[in-house]
Amino acid sequence: MTDELFEQAARIAVHAEREMQALVGVSSPSGDVPGAEEAIALCSAFLPDTAVLERVPCSSAGFAPDLVARIVGTGTRRLMLLGHVDTVVSHGQHAQARLERDRIYGAGTVDMKGGVALALGIARALAEQPERFGELAVLMVTDEEWRTASFAHVGRFAGYDACLCFEAGEISDEGHDRVIVARKAASTLRVTATGRAAHSGSAPHEGANALLALARASLALSERADPHGSQKLTVVPTIMHAGDAINVVPAAGEIVFDMRANDLSAFDPVLAAVPASLDGVALEAWLERIWPGMDSRAQTSDVLAAGSARLGRPIVAGARGGASDASHFAASIPLTIDGLGPRGDGAHTPQEFALRDSLRERTEVALALALTILER
């Protein structure tokens, strides 16, 4: 079985490299409808002929519809393969995929068009073995990178046996293939300030400085972080805007915090700590982009062990702080495994790359786990 798996994975990886380069060649920053439509068209073309395709509303208003593909088998198990086609690199920074020695450069090579190519290859391989599954689904969303709305697809896949997500892969310190079975919860805390303008030279005392209030709030809220505590809470100010002129006390402003923790409940005390006002400046705060945490360690341990035996080398469990759509499914599909995409670096930058050899290695891992799950 291992020899057959390796041969099949090698074939998938050859096609995945070409398909990844085609997907990376499409500039699809999150929210760009034409780019998303072109990327989804490629995904549709790369799916097996037996797949029934459906375009469903995206979680985010104004975005291109998401893609759901379903393949009916003659078995009993239901497996979903998950990915996204949007990136954070703008049209102006986009470039065609290029190969330099052992690296393939381009926006989305690891986050996550490389993973999408692997998922589509796995779908084609499994579609040739319909006796292994009752239903195989592929979900490709167009808004993962900038979504602030509630995720729309959890109910659509209720009752599925497993979810495999193809965000970037990793290797452990010992050199073993690592997958992601735990992720932090994530949320954005947004605080707006409404003060009073005044001339900053002749009458600064008559103003209520929104910038100073936001700066004070930033320091106070940042100090509530406890990265080594039970919740591993981080509170990081990432964006601040205030003021429009060099000689006017800023009357309004806004600051944004990125928060991560083991559980969503850790964010409520931070929100509650925002005062209603500071030095005459009114503050208003709310949470948006609320992503649940994920912890599938207990549920996946046996699968990882069996998959390792099938593969003939260890597949180890890992955790990651970054958010992923896999987290939305983990509560309803406990057998959720992420980080099955290629390995690389530089995600969210124009220097992003995937390691070419990892396409085959990670396909072997994903295929071993998929077959193990379907035989449970």
Image: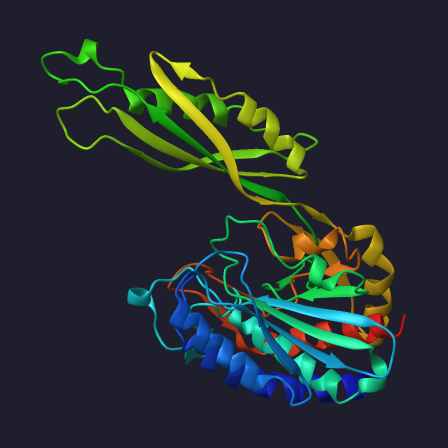
Which residue: 65% across, 62% down? Answer: 339
Q: Is residue 252 above or below residue 352?
A: above
The answer to whether residue 203 is left or right of residue 331 is left
The image shows residue 99 at horizontal and vertical percentages of 43, 80
Q: In front: 376, or 333?
A: 333
Q: Is residue 103 visible?
A: no
User: If the image is split into quadrants, where does the N terminus sit?
Assistant: bottom right
The answer to whether residue 44 is left or right of residue 79 is left
Q: Is residue 204 above or below residue 352?
A: above
Q: In front: 102, or 112?
A: 112
Which residue: 15% across, 18% down? Answer: 200
The image shows residue 317 at horizontal and vertical percentages of 74, 56
Q: Report which quarter residue 157 is drawn in.
A: bottom right
The image shows residue 266 at horizontal and vertical percentages of 64, 31
The answer to whether residue 182 is left or right of residue 323 is right
Coloring applied to the structure: rainbow
Q: In front: 351, or 18?
A: 18
Q: Is residue 333 above or below residue 51?
A: above
The image shows residue 163 at horizontal and vertical percentages of 73, 64
Q: Report which quarter residue 44 is drawn in.
A: bottom right
User: If the image is split into quadrants, where does the C terminus sit?
Assistant: bottom right
Which residue: 31% across, 30% down? Answer: 253
Q: Report which quarter residue 299 is drawn in.
A: bottom right
The residue lying furthest to the right in this view is: 376
Number of dots carrying numbers:
0
Q: Is residue 110 visible?
A: yes
The residue lying furthest to the left in this view is: 202
